Amino acid sequence: PQGPPMSLAPNPLAPLSFAFDIDGVVYHHTPGLGCQLIPGAMEAFQLLEAKNVPYVFLSNSSGSYEGEKAAQLSTMLSREISEEQVVLATTPFFDLTPEYKHKRVLVVALHESTSHKLAKHYGLENYITIQRYAHRHPHLVPCKAYPKDKEQAGSDSEPEPLIEAVFIFEVPLDWWESIQVLVDLLRSNGRPGREHEASTQVIPVFSASADFHYGSTHSLPRLTNGAFLMCLQTIFAQATNGRTLTIQFFGKPCLPVYTCARARLEDQRRKHPHHHQQQQHASSSLHTTIYMIGDNPHSDIKGALAAGDPWRAILVRTGCFQGGANDEEFPAHHVCENILEAVQCALGLHGLL
């Protein structure tokens, strides 16, 4: 059974907030086995709600949208998690909808069904998946056998509409196919071919996550979207005599998701019944310390440090980070064994334990 929504507690809000990474902090995900809660996670959220502490989930997790992730977390944690409490690497894509809603864009995800789901969710109406694009132009990947159908381009076919942007929701399954298609497209004016090559990058590339790897139940981290994009940029440079492929990132450690998460936390405070009473005593009651709890120094911690006040970073050892006292390149403010110890550490700093 699910517990009550955390925002309905009658007591005044605590003077701090939390943003939690998910995979490697709350649970471990293993393909084929599903998700297993990390020990201490359930107790951590019970403690936060007992102390009336606002929190959001801030994740580079891919393949689902905010409502789906909220439903999954609600089931796993046996409490109501709202869609507004989930900020994903793709969430800032909503800001791009007005410009690209009707433009022809290429979308990339692990599976074609995921591309359809996410493109529609983020308001893209004139998209084509990278799998469908490759299928319609089999000459782009000549060693791969595509089923023949009437959609495939031929000598008498209508010209393919120019691609005006690329949206990378998550790492694709077939790196070879995706890199070949993207290198051809991104060196062109929007239509692959020597006759359409451009001297500079014409097509913008928007990517949700820059994570190189993520923590799982395997003893070593697993490669993900950042590793794929590193390959893409390296091969693009080789194919274009050293040109740099520009990619705009939106997920951690980039600022857009931290800005979005902070706005969601401030909105929780603004909607709380005690907010107006608290404002009479502290005009900056919305701007409390925000603790980023993460397992990846190069993503969670780097982003929180770059975002500056009011962010603070707590690194846990249940995912990517398995090092010594702290990460040397992006040292967190505190290092804890797991999510429960991290919550207890932060609450203790504010005299709430």
Image (cartoon, rainbow, N blue to C red):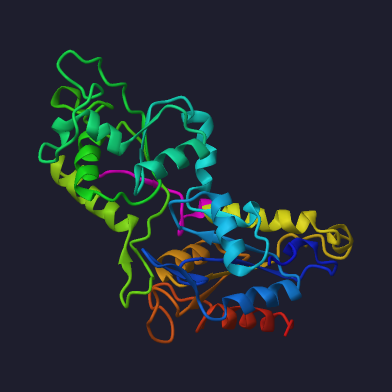
Question: In the figure, 352 relative to 10: above or below?
Answer: below
Question: In the figure, 200 relative to 271: above or below?
Answer: above
In this rendering, position of residue 75 left or right of residue 155? right
Q: Which quadrant is home to the C terminus?
A: bottom right
Who's the residue at 14% across and 38% down the image? 145
In this rendering, position of residue 195 left or right of residue 109? left
Q: Quadrant of residue 328?
A: bottom left
Q: Which quadrant is home to the N terminus?
A: bottom right
Q: Quadrant of residue 24?
A: bottom left
Who's the residue at 43% across and 51% down the image? 63
The location of residue 88, given as percent across then percent down, is 51, 53
The location of residue 325, given as percent across then percent down, is 43, 86
How many numbered discs, if any? Answer: 0
Question: In the figure, 264 relative to 336: above or below?
Answer: above
Who's the residue at 55% across and 77% down the image? 339
In this rendering, position of residue 212 left or right of residue 159? right
Main SS category, magenta section: loop
Q: Nearer the viewer, residue 19 or 38?
A: 38
Q: Which residues are magenta?
A: 244-256
Who's the residue at 28% across and 58% down the image? 227
Q: Is residue 144 magenta?
A: no
In this rendering, position of residue 262 left or right of residue 128? right
The location of residue 226, given as percent across then percent down, is 33, 56
Q: Is residue 250 magenta?
A: yes
Name of the residue lying farthest toward the left = 143
Q: Quadrant of residue 57?
A: bottom right
Name of the residue lying farthest toward the front = 1
The location of residue 310, given as percent across then percent down, is 63, 65
